[in-house]
Every structure is written in C-alpha cells, then in structure tokens.
C-alpha cells in the first residue's frame, strides 16, 4: 500500500497510522487526502492481523489543525460543498465502526493542535490520549470562519461531553487545554509528549476484545455529580428545550444575529439530538454548503488569510536584518506601560526594566504584571514556577540605571509632545547607538517627537491598543528617517509579543486613530441632528461593532478623545472638525468611565448603567427625534471608510490588506464585513461613491469621496 500523506506500520497487531500531509508544514484535512484515508481504512478493515489502531501525527506538535481552508475558496456552489462533507462523513463513520463493528479499538494520540476537523477525527476514536505540551489544544473554531463543525462535530461532541459543554465549545469557537479536556471527558488521559505513543500502543493493546470499555476517563467524567445533574436536564425533553432556548438567547446577545454560522451550528446540534445521527449529518452537510459560500464566511476567511500572510511580513520593501531584542526598557508603568512590560516578558521572553516617576507608581506596574501572571496560572497556562521565573525578569526603577544595554525602549506616557521629546533625549543619553526607541503614541507624529533626536534613524512608533494583553494589533509607525533595520526589529519583536503587526507611514493619527476620529465625530453630528445616544450606539452594534461610538468615547476618555480631535483638526482642517457643542462635555467635567461622568452612568466600581439623560443638557441639545437606523450606521461607517481610502491614497497604508486588518483587529470593525476595503469591494466602489456624494450634498465636504474611490469606481477595480 503506497501512501502519500500517511505512514502506516503494524507492530504486534497494532496498526500505527500517522498523518503526514506531504509538502505542508501542518496537517490539514480535505479531499486531497481522502484517497489515502480510504486506503488506510480498507487495509485495517480487511487485515485480520490488525487487532487495534493508533492514529496520530508524524508532524511534531501538530495532530491535525483542521480543514484545508484554501480548498474552501474553490467552492462556489452550496451543493458541491455539501457533497464534500458527505464524503468526509462516510470516512469518519468507517473509522468509528472499526471498534463498534470490527472490534478493533482505535486510540487517538493527540499532540499539538487538534482543531476543527482534527477534533472531529479524534471524536471517532474509542479513546483519546493527549499530551500535556503547550501546543496541545482541542476545539471547534469553525464558527470563527463563518462555517460550522461539519465533520460530525455537532453530532459526536454532544454525545461525548454533553450538550451544554458541546454548545459552549461549538458556538464560541474557543479551544481548551488538555487537562480541561480530561475534566469534561473529552480526552481519557493526559501524558508527557515523549511517552505518547508508548502509552497509546499500550492502551490500544489492552483494549483488544474489550468492546465499549475503553473510555475510562470519559466514564469518570460522566459519573461526576455535576455532570449527572446536567445530564438529567439534557435527557429530559423539557430540559432540552430550556437548554437550547438559553443557548440561542446567549448566542444572539453576542452575535446580534449578524453571524449565521452559530445559528446553523445550534440547529444542527438540535436536529441530531432530536432526530438522530442521519438527520444530524445531513443537516451538517446542507448547512456547510450554505455557509461556506456565504459573504460572511468569505469575509471571515479573508481576515484569516490576511492574518496568516502578515506573520511573514517584515514591513519593508527590501531586506534588512533585525536586531536581536533580549532587553527591553519601558518608560511609564501605567495601564499601557505595564501591559507592554507584561507581554514583553510573558510572550517575547525578554528581560524588562520599567521606569516610573516614583516608587508607588513603579510598584503598581509590577503589581499589574503579577496579577496578569496569576491569571495565567489560574487558567493552567503557566505553572507557579514558570510565573515566578517570568516575574523575576521584570524590574522597576525611578532612575535611568539598567537602561544602558537595552535593545529596545518603548515609551508609554501621556500624549504630551514636550514630555515625549524630553524622554527621547534622556533615553538617547542613557543608551547606545544600536538601541531602538519607540513611542506608544496614538496621534502625535513621530517625526515631531524625533525632531531633535540624535539618532532619528532608530526612532519609530509602536502604537499598542488597550488592554495590551488582549488586543491583537500593533501599529508600527515609521518616518522618512527610520532605518529599515529599526523597522524590522520592531516588527519581529511585535510578533514575538503575539501581535498582528501593520507598518504605516508617519502622520497625525497614523492610520487607526485617523479613521477613528471621523467615526466618532459623525456620532456627535448625529446627536446634534436629534438622534438619541441609545439609537446611535445601538445602530452601530447592530451593524457589527462590539460597542457603539459614544460608549467607546466614554471608555477612551472624553478628555483624551477631545485632545486627539484637536490634533487632527490642526492637521487636517475643517474636514476633521466635530460639532462645537461637544465642548459642553468638558465644561461639565465629563471624562467618561474614569471619573464616572460621561454619556452613561457608572456606579462606584465603574460598572456602566443606563444613559445619563443629563448629558443632553450639558451638550445644549433639545428634544430627541427618531432617525432611520440605516442613516445612522451609513453616515458613521462611511465616514470611517472614506478616511481609510484617503490613508491608502496618501500611502499612509502600505496596502488595503493592512487597512482591513488594522480596522478589524484594532478598532473592532465587523470581521464578517472583512474590513473597510473588503467591504468596499463587496458593495462596489461605485455604490460607495454614490452614497458619499449624496451625503456630501446634504452635510458638506466631510463626505467628499476620496479620489481613489472615484478612480476605482470609474475603472471597476477592486482593492482586495
């Protein structure tokens, strides 16, 4: 038997089958390997010398990462997609039958990513053994790509771990670590990586002849009191109705009904539970065909492919060697600085020296990092010893001692040009020629910060987003004087911190802040036109943003937003001007959440309540009126999208792809819309221009279409 994508050996009656997709760094599943898979199953079914099976991977640290997503791009007909899934179902049913029908137990040996189709393959086994390696995770992330688990995941997972636990994994797309998987009965055993195959073969051998008795840990999990209680609910028709209803309500609260995949996944689970496997599998196939060809899935896959491409981007057009960064200095230990220090030590593995103005502030920076490390320990992502080792790499001071050998210094202080210039001068005096200096500014031009720099070639911006530990984007800002070696050093370090990195050209607001200001301004204009706060924020949430623009202003800080707006107004003139009534917020000492006075009410712990109706009086606004929701989200979204196009036209952006990723990962632009440029392509540049022209006729020059949009409309070109 000649195989291209598998290795196959038989030892003492145990077939050891290792997936090794040819020419690929990771194992994925798709039609390209179906013939090999069929041949493997044929051999096992028909060879009487094979008494048990171990299925694993020949690629270290990667069991099976899921479906070959590139194949999805070839699917244009829903029926074609459904047919592929039916073929996959047939293969997986045969693997499942090896034990149930042929009395040949199958042990799944899992090391590394076991996601999507990988987990669905693992679910067909008699037993699942996972390693305790850091790369090992199990999950059904399909909804994040706009599809559903269609390899039997919506059918087998509820049977193995229960409906409630399965819905949590399927509808969120979250993956879990091995010990959590063992706790809920998803895996039977967690073992050291180096012992995986020895133990898997031992368990497979011991299972020979023990039909249906190989799920040791899973059985223990099912006998746990908490699981028996949930099982009682799930086996009761009334209980199931309540469970599915609550799951749907929670899902819709999160997705606002904008993402069809979770809804279809829930439906497939319900069909399988109520009508049986055959109906459930057919629902999976039909829904997959429908979803994989949908605009939402295409957009989400576009975001995924873009994020993968950016892992290999250096941010420069030529080539340059990055400097190795092992020692980092952070100036400022507030929320941003402490977050930068944390990801530098935790993810990038560097030593970090934090400088603050006094001992109390330095202590708060270290306490912030300690709190974050404790969360990692609680989630079993770190051991106590590992957390202690990381904490020992971070120190704090009020002096410049310990900075002389820093490879990279990241300044994270208040948006004051004078303060940032002063810190740059001090940093250059305290460090060597090879030290890169980065300012974590959200709006101030880097060229102005570096105007008097002794080494301007080593100065750039590294714009992080709050909270640093969670937000995935890093916007690196380069001037005409920034050297390529400094740029690639910052890019590579950002990737080590776990960030998706875009490199943009220097200018007021760079890219993300620049497109955010007209977005926020337009919300204020709508307020002045009579819209309510609830209507504005609600419309944008229903359009797909995680929070509305006025709530976002509260979160950022009304005073901070006003400061940034002034910078943008000075740079770009009236096009960036908001309505004058906004000054009333500052006059009324409204700073947002931080002083518990903003568009919304806040309790003593800063928890948000309802809209603060007195804000209308502070703004000098009269009675409210109802505006059409399409006008609200149309004006706000188009203001942002038009400015994004200008950024590309002025070469602030290197590419439309960078613009899409910056908006999605930095500002919460709806992922299912793919980003500003992807969305322009879907609507058509001519349609966007027509909408902007109509708005400009009513509201003035701020809606005048960017020149590049008119060019693309006339030539029918696409950005992506």
Image (spheres, helix red, strand yellow):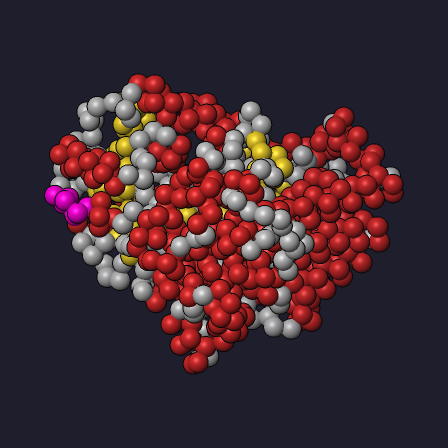
Instruction: Please tell me in which quadrant of the rendered image residue 166 appears.
Output: top right
Percent x, y of residue 401: 19, 25
Q: Say if 536 sits above or below 468 in the image.
A: below
Give the magenta-colored segment's residue range.
Answer: 450-456
Secondary structure character of the magenta stretch overall:
loop
Q: Position of residue 78 (x, y in %)?
A: 67, 70
Q: Residue at x 55, y 33 (%)?
A: 191
Among all residues in the image, which is located at the extreme right? Answer: 237
Residue 661 falls inside the magenta stretch: no
Comparing 564 with 575, the one in front is: 575
Classify residue 47 as left or right of residue 277.
Answer: left
Q: Residue at x 35, y 48 (%)?
A: 566
Judge by depth and name the residue closer to the eye, 629 or 365.
629
Magenta stretch holds residue 454: yes
Taking the image as drawn, is residue 11 in sight? no
Tell me how many marks there are: 0
Please state the horizontal and vertical placement of residue 609, each as a whole percent of the image. Answer: 61, 34
Q: Quadrant of residue 224?
A: top right
């Amino acid at each position: 038997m000649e195989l291209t994508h598998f290795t196959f050996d038989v030892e003492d009656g145990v077939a050891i089958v290792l997936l090794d997709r040819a020419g690929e760094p990771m194992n994925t599943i798709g039609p390209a390997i179906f013939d090999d898979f069929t041949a493997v199953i044929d051999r096992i079914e028909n060879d009487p010398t094979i008494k048990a099976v171990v299925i694993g991977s020949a690629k270290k640290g990667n069991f099976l990462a899921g479906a070959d997503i590139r194949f999805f791009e070839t699917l244009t007909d829903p029926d074609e997609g459904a047919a592929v899934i039916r073929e996959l179902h047939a293969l997986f049913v045969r693997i499942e039958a090896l034990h149930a029908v042929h009395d040949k137990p199958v042990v799944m040996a899992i090391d590394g990513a076991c996601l999507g189709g990988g987990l669905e393959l693992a679910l067909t086994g008699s037993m699942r053994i996972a390693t305790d390696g850091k790369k090992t995770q199990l999950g059904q992330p399909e909804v994040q790509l706009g599809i559903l688990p269609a390899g039997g995941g919506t059918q087998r997972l509820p049977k193995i771990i229960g409906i409630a636990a399965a819905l949590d994994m399927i509808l969120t797309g979250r993956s879990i670590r091995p010990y959590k998987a063992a706790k809920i009965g998803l895996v039977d055993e967690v073992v050291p990586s180096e012992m995986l195959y020895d133990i898997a073969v031992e368990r497979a051998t011991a299972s020979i002849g023990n039909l249906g008795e190989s799920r040791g840990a899973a059985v223990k999990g099912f006998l746990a009191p908490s699981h028996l209680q949930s099982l009682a609910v799930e086996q009761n028709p009334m209980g199931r109705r309540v469970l599915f209803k609550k799951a749907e309500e929670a899902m819709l609260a999160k997705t606002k009904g904008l993402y069809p995949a979770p809804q279809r996944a829930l439906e497939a689970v319900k069909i399988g539970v109520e009508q049986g496997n055959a109906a459930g599998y057919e629902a999976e196939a039909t829904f997959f065909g429908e979803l994989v060809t949908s605009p939402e899935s295409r957009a989400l896959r576009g975001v995924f492919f873009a994020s993968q491409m950016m892992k290999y981007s250096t941010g420069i057009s030529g080539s340059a060697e990055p400097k190795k960064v092992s020692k980092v200095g952070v100036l400022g230990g507030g929320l941003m600085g402490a977050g930068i220090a944390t990801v530098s030590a935790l993810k990038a593995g560097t030593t970090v020296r934090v400088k603050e103005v006094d001992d109390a502030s330095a202590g708060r920076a270290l306490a912030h990092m300690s709190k974050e490390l404790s969360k990692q320990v609680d989630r079993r992502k770190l051991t106590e010893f590992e957390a202690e080792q990381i904490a020992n790499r971070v120190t704090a001071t009020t002096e410049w001692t310990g900075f002389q050998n820093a490879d990279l210094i990241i300044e994270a202080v208040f948006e004051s040009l004078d303060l940032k210039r002063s810190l740059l001068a001090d940093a250059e005096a305290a460090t060597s020629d090879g030290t890169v200096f980065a300012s974590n500014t959200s709006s101030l031009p880097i060229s102005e910060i570096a105007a008097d720099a002794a080494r301007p070639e080593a100065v750039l911006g590294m714009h992080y987003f709050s909270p640093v530990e969670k937000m995935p984007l890093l916007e690196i800002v380069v001037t005409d004087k920034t050297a390529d070696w400094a740029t690639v050093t910052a890019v590579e370090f950002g990737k080590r911190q776990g960030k998706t990195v875009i490199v943009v050209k220097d200018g007021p607001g760079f890219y993300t802040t620049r497109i955010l200001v007209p977005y926020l301004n337009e919300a204020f204009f709508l307020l002045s036109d009579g819209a309510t706060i609830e209507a504005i924020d609600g419309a944008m949430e229903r359009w797909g943003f995680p929070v509305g623009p006025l709530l976002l202003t509260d979160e950022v800080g009304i005073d901070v937003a006003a400061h940034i707006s002034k910078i943008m107004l000075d740079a770009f003139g009236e096009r960036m001007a908001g309505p004058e009534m906004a000054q009333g917020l500052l006059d009324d000492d409204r700073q947002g959440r931080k002083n518990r006075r903003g568009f919304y009410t806040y309790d003593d712990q800063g928890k948000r309540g309802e809209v603060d109706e007195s804000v209308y009086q502070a703004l000098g606004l009269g009675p409210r009126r109802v505006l059409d929701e399409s006008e609200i989200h149309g004006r706000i979204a188009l203001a942002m999208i038009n400015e994004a196009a200008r950024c590309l036209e002025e070469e602030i952006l290197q590419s439309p792809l960078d613009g899409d990723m910056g908006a999605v990962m930095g500002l919460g632009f709806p992922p299912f819309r793919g980003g500003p440029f992807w969305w322009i392509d879907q609507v058509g540049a001519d349609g966007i221009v027509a909408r902007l022209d109509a708005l400009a006729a009513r509201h003035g020059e701020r809606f005048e279409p960017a020149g590049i949009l008119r060019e693309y409309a006339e030539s029918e070109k696409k950005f992506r």
